[in-house]
Image (spheres, coloured by chain):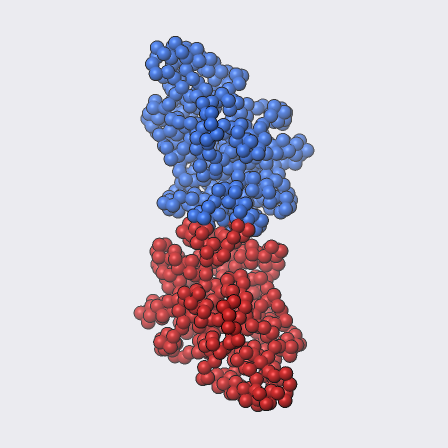
Chain colours: A blue, B red
């Protein structure tokens, strides 16, 4: 495999300044992922960890191999626990502020891989309260609509209905609130302010919210009746929540939650996080084939201004979102490496890559939509009810 | 009736400084209730309001007449609404941080009078979350125990089971949380800080809590499916919650909650609020007759140092907690006025008043305990369940 994954030469390669911002609510600028590891105090995923995963699962998921999941906290500890026959729960989540796009699906598909390989129970939280509290103009009715649509996407991802439960904050608050109160009691405003950047103008709902997102870290221990390891696969912008949670875990008699952090999928038109708020740069699971065609066709690429120049100079695959989309989603490793070389040497035109991406995406979304339709009949099987799950 | 109720000459008469503190979590110093009205920006209960109450109910409750309930916000508006055949809900609450004493029962008995006279539905909130979050050392198990015991006291007070529902925050959070989120979104940290005195060291649970106490103000509107007036009888230390709630009510499409504020029942040994944390100065509903006897016998009084001096100079009934206990709880208006005159003129010794108070309290608590026992069988009838209540 050609190494294209270190931050020096991936999609952020042209960023020479430190000017990027990553919080749970804002991802801005060109991300230097190595700097982010330093800034957040997490650990890079090393070869020795990848070896452990391969030993446990028999194969390495492409998103690990490609270092899309690039950073962690105590992932090695979770793997050691697993080797000692102590199972872990998976916990991930989604803020239902819009429809789901392919960028959202990547960590979910990876989470499904973890569930399949490690046989883990999964809690999937929908933070509808947070999305309501955060946006001044968003109504609860709007959020409720997205919550329903997002649940279909979660189920369509293919999680095991026996091992997966969805927790919607406003719907399941009675299961979260006692744990959240225990957590909240241990976090001062000054800590929350420094971790999340709260200010005097932040509403008290947002200030009170982080313990609600922390609570599912400990719910498995409540379900199992004993301290239970939890692994959180999520984009790294969510790390502040887990940093805070880890600080209180042991005082509450639980394990610190482990994490494995992903990068952000670049949008089709810019660097940074693929964004629901810029719908033209994201392929949604609800998009019609014509929309996908149009978006891919209008995508930004790493190509030269003319065909002639492209043949002469070659393209900048590393700075091209179409390349990354194909690499993460549709190409095999070998196909992707070949694509990179062909592009660099001027033997590949942007139209070909776009055509591959459009074809792949249309087929993927068409299939996904069918699973989404079927999901409508089985929602109840996936909803947390405080019973019939776990042990 | 002898006027003993203005703050100039009631239990706070010897307080010439402004040094008292009233927050939902702290009542300190000798309270000047007139100053408190100014400080909080509430309204005094005027004769014209008392006339309206008398017109509506046919009689004036002693706690109104004696100005134990002395301040309000929009109580007159509620009475006008009632005259226009628009019914109101009552809402009051209790923080279950300990056992219930007679000081707690006074506003509850008054609330029962309002329920009986106006035929109002009542929501009774137990803020177990707040009491857990506030005290560093208090466990949820301890709070749960007090919550159960306090529920027995609430039911024993005699509320109408058809018209009364108890809401325990951690038990009924699913009904409160959506409303609380709507409220929380509209309150910034800087507002909460100035209303409640929060600081950097306040835990985020306490900062997130006020909307939970505000939510029952609007629950009646949810139950009735239309904006519904609410009257809150409560001690004035809770006013900051309602001030905050009133600020957001109209933006949410609801009426501002009305309030009627009580003073604090003096303890048997000091001025200020009767306090669970000083058990020797309060008569609890769980006290045995011997304990009551002992507490009353050790009570501070307004008497002189010796019998001789008492006969010569007379006692200070106005500064005497035993007098106030008798006046608020057991004496008729006429008996109390006579007691005042006899004490002032030296014709009454402290032993006699203490004997009256011990006798009255023992008999009252004995009866109350019987009702408390019976309450154990009907708890379920009183618990809010989101259904079968209201309309």
Q: Residue furthest left?
A: B84
Q: Looking at the rendering, in which quadrant would you find the C terminus of chain B?
A: bottom left
For image coordinates 51% across by 19% down, the residue present is A4
| Closer to us: A127 or A112 | A127
Percent x, y for residue B296?
Answer: 62, 78
Q: Looking at the image, how many numbered discs can be counted on the residues?
A: 0
- Residue B256 is situated, as x and y percent measured from the top left of the image, at 37, 61
Left or right: residue B124 versus residue A353 is right
Percent x, y for residue B236?
Answer: 47, 67
The residue drawn where x is 50% and y is 52% is B207
Q: Residue furthest front?
A: B17
Say above or below: A173 vs B52: above
Which residue appears at 37% of the width and 16% of the height? A304
Q: Is residue B128 visible?
A: yes
Choose between B136 and B36: the one closer to the eye: B36
Please tell me whether residue B110 is drawn above or below residue B389 in the rendered image. below
Q: Give the side of residue B186 with respect to residue A332, left or right.
A: left
Q: Quadrant of the N terminus of chain B?
A: bottom left
Q: Is residue B223 visible?
A: no
Q: Nearer the viewer, residue A205 or A108?
A: A205
């Amino acid at each position: 495999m050609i190494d294209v994954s270190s931050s020096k030469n991936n999609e952020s390669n042209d960023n020479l300044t430190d000017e990027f911002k990553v919080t749970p609510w804002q991802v801005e600028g060109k991300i230097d992922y190595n700097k982010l590891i330093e800034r957040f105090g997490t650990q890079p995923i090393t070869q020795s960890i990848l070896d452990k995963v391969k030993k446990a699962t028999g194969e390495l998921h492409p998103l690990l191999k490609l270092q899309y999941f690039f950073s962690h906290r105590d992932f090695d500890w979770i793997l050691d626990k697993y080797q000692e026959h102590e199972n872990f729960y998976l916990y991930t989540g989604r803020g239902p502020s819009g429809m789901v796009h392919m960028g959202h699906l990547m960590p979910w598909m990876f989470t499904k891989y973890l569930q399949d390989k490690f046989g883990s129970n999964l809690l999937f939280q929908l933070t509808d309260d947070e999305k309501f509290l955060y946006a001044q103009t968003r109504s609860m009715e709007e959020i409720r609509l997205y919550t329903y649509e997002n649940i279909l996407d979660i189920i369509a991802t293919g999680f095991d209905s026996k091992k997966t439960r969805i927790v919607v904050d406003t719907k399941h608050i009675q299961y979260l609130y006692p744990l959240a109160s225990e957590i909240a009691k241990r976090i001062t405003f000054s800590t929350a302010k420094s971790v999340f950047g709260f200010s005097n103008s932040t509403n008290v709902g947002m200030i009170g919210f982080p313990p609600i997102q922390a609570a599912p870290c400990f719910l498995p221990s409540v379900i199992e009746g004993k301290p239970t390891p939890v692994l959180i696969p999520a984009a790294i912008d969510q790390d502040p929540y887990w940093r805070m949670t880890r600080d209180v875990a042991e005082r509450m008699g639980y394990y610190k939650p482990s994490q494995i952090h992903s990068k952000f999928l670049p949008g089709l038109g810019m660097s940074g996080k693929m964004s629901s708020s810029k719908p033209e740069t994201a392929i949604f699971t609800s998009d019609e084939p014509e929309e996908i065609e149009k978006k891919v066709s209008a995508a930004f690429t790493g190509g030269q201004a003319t065909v002639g120049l492209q043949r002469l100079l070659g393209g900048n695959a590393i700075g091209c979102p179409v390349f990354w989309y194909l690499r993460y989603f549709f190409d095999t490793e070998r196909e992707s490496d070949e694509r990179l070389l062909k592009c660099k040497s001027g033997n590949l035109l942007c139209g070909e890559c776009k055509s591959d991406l459009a074809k792949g995406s249309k087929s993927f979304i068409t299939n996904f939509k069918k699973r989404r339709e079927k999901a409508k009949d089985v929602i109840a099987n996936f909803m947390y009810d405080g019973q019939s799950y776990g042990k």
